[in-house]
Amino acid sequence: MADLPVIDGATVDERSQNFLAGYAVGIYKTLTFWDNAVTNTNIDRDMVICVAFAESTLGRYLSTDDNIGNIGNNDR
């Protein structure tokens, strides 16, 4: 457990942006996208980012066999 990378940042927003910069692709890299996605909801932005990471690795595998959240679905 000592060799795990740590997401740096002084605030939650900085840590979220650093995480997205390292893992997300395209539009999924911006906090604005995620803030807009949860506008007028009771859903926590960072929870949505976690679900998106688990479902599609934040856009990296939306149409490949590695799309672990939708086995057999290519998201077309």
Image: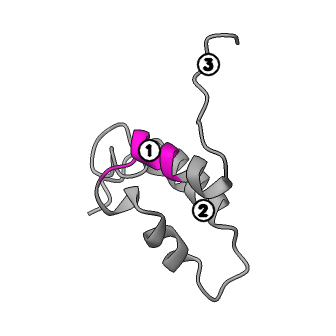
Q: Return the residue nearer the eye: 5 or 71.
A: 5
Quarter of the image holding residue 27?
bottom left
Q: Answer few, some or many: residues within 10 Å of disc 3's Cα (few below 14, many 20 plus, some between 14 and 19).
A: few
Q: Return the residue nearer the eye: 67 or 38.
A: 38
What amino acid is labelled 1 in the image? Thr
In primary-sequence order, the first of circles 2 and 3 is 3
Instruction: Report the side of 70 relative to 13 (left or right).
Output: left
What amino acid is labelled 2 in the image? Val
User: Which quadrant: the C terminus?
Assistant: bottom left
Q: Which residue is mark 1?
A: 57
Q: Which residue is mark 3?
A: 4
The local secondary structure at tag 3 comes to loop
Q: Which residue is mark 2?
A: 48
The extreme front residue here reads: 10
Q: Give the color scheme: rainbow, by chain, secondary structure or one colour.
A: one colour
What residue appears at the point 73 percent right and 80 percent down from the top-left corner?
Answer: 42
Quarter of the image holding residue 7?
top right
Up/down of 32 relative to 2, above or below: below
The local secondary structure at tag 2 comes to helix
Q: Answer few, some or many: residues within 10 Å of disc 1's Cα (few below 14, many 20 plus, some between 14 and 19).
A: many
In primary-sequence order, the first of circles 3 and 1 is 3
* Residue 52 seen from this side: yes
